[in-house]
Image (tube, rainbow, N blue to C red):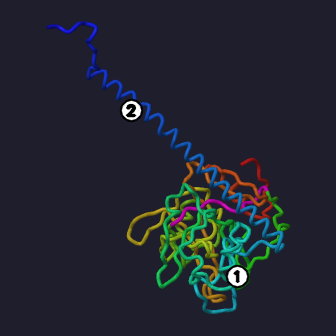
Amino acid sequence: MQMPRRYMRKAFTLIELLVVIAIIAILIALLLPAVQQAREAARRTQCKNNLKQLGLAIHNYLDVYRYLPPSACINPTLTVTGNNGSWGVHGRILPYLEQGNLYDNVDITDAWDFQPAISGLKIPVYACPSDPESDRVRDPGGGKSFLYSTNYGFNFGTWFVYDPVTGEGGDGMFYPNASLRMGSVTDGTSNTLLASEVKAWQPYRRNAGPPSTSVPQSITDAETAAASGSDFKDTGHTEWPDGRVHHHGFTTTMTPNTVVHCDDGSGNMVDCDYNSWQEGKNGIAGNPSYAIITSRSHHPGVVQTALMDGSARSVSENIALTVWRSLGTRSGGEVVGEF
């Protein structure tokens, strides 16, 4: 017996079902990038806010001490020094980042690597949320404090960092034993970099050279300098209290996100930084320091920066090298246009 027509229900055919699935898949494919872009925009905003906080902290430090903090305090008369003797700017500005309790529980006049208050402690304002390595803890071994990295380096200038014999420092805003006032920024605070993004766990070479004390003018020059380093490490910017430039800063030798290749010691070529000599190591018996510590970011096409006037802004990785270097000097006399 045939069922009355009013009780018959038309089911989906296989083709119709496949069409619906295809439409849903297309909608998801369109939606996911938008969600990812929204998340990255939020992370980029948080990153810029972190740099803004660093700028405000530096200005508050200036209000109290009248001088910018040195990158490290070094006794150049010593002929043998420990590697981890001095705290950098990150440690000295803790009270101005609402980290006063932590500051009260450390001694910045003593080596930081055996101070338990910092062991395993992540300071959120020092970490970019877009860097997947910012949550990776470093165990230096030997019972030393476990450390988180930093994604924000302070401006050490163009290339030359420090000479322990003369006590001379570079042309940026920070170097060992510095006592710079805001008045030293004759290029203008809105035209001078305070800090910029760096990548955590950045490979670098150190301790030899450079082949020439002239500022590298090309990627080839930079790679030649990096190749002169006798010691390869993959731990750059992993020790936030450390005042040395490869953990603590950046230089404007190369434009943001420039890839500088070097051998990792096993025949593999990696994107690396370079520090000719660890500032303060062996005191006056040590060598001058020159560094290629490139500002790098996980934000596509840009790096986030803070300027000496306390503002924070994005800078394109395509910025001209002459402009980027001009922003790195405090009193170079350059004319900086729009950037």
Sooner in the amino-acid sequence: mark 2 or mark 1: 2
Nearest the viewer among 229 and 53 is: 53
Question: Which residue, as the protein is rendered here, is positioned at the far right?
Answer: 183
Q: Is residue 159 above or below residue 10?
A: below
Q: Amino acid at mark 1?
A: Cys
User: Residue 98 is drawn in which quadrant?
Assistant: bottom right
Q: Is residue 159 above or below residue 231?
A: above
Q: Residue at left 71%, top 71%? A: 93
Structural crowding at the residue carrying mark 1, measured as other residues with C-alpha within 10 Å and reported as few (<14), some (14–19) or many (≥20): some
Residue beneath disc 1: 73
Nearest the viewer among 68 and 23 is: 23
Nearest the viewer among 191 and 102 is: 102
Picture coordinates of residue 200, whole percent (x, y): 54, 64
User: Residue 26 is drawn in which quadrant?
Assistant: top left
Q: Amino acid at mark 2?
A: Ala
Q: Nearer the viewer, mark 2 or mark 1?
A: 2
Residue beneath disc 2: 25
Secondary structure under the numbered disc 1 in the rendered image: loop
Distance between the Cα atoms at labels 2 and 1?
59 Å
Q: Residue at left 84%, top 72%? A: 66
Tag of residue 197: none
Q: Is residue 324 left or right of residue 271?
A: right
* 2 and 1 marks in contact (CB < 8 Å): no
Secondary structure under the numbered disc 2 in the rendered image: helix
Q: Is residue 51 above or below residue 206?
A: above
Picture coordinates of residue 107, whole percent (x, y): 67, 83
Picture coordinates of residue 111, whole percent (x, y): 62, 84
Q: Is residue 148 above or below residue 37?
A: below
Q: Residue at left 50%, top 62%? A: 133
Question: Which residue, as the protein is rendered here, is positioned at the far left?
Answer: 1
- The residue range painted magenta reads 190-201
Structural crowding at the residue carrying mark 2, measured as other residues with C-alpha within 10 Å and reported as few (<14), some (14–19) or many (≥20): few
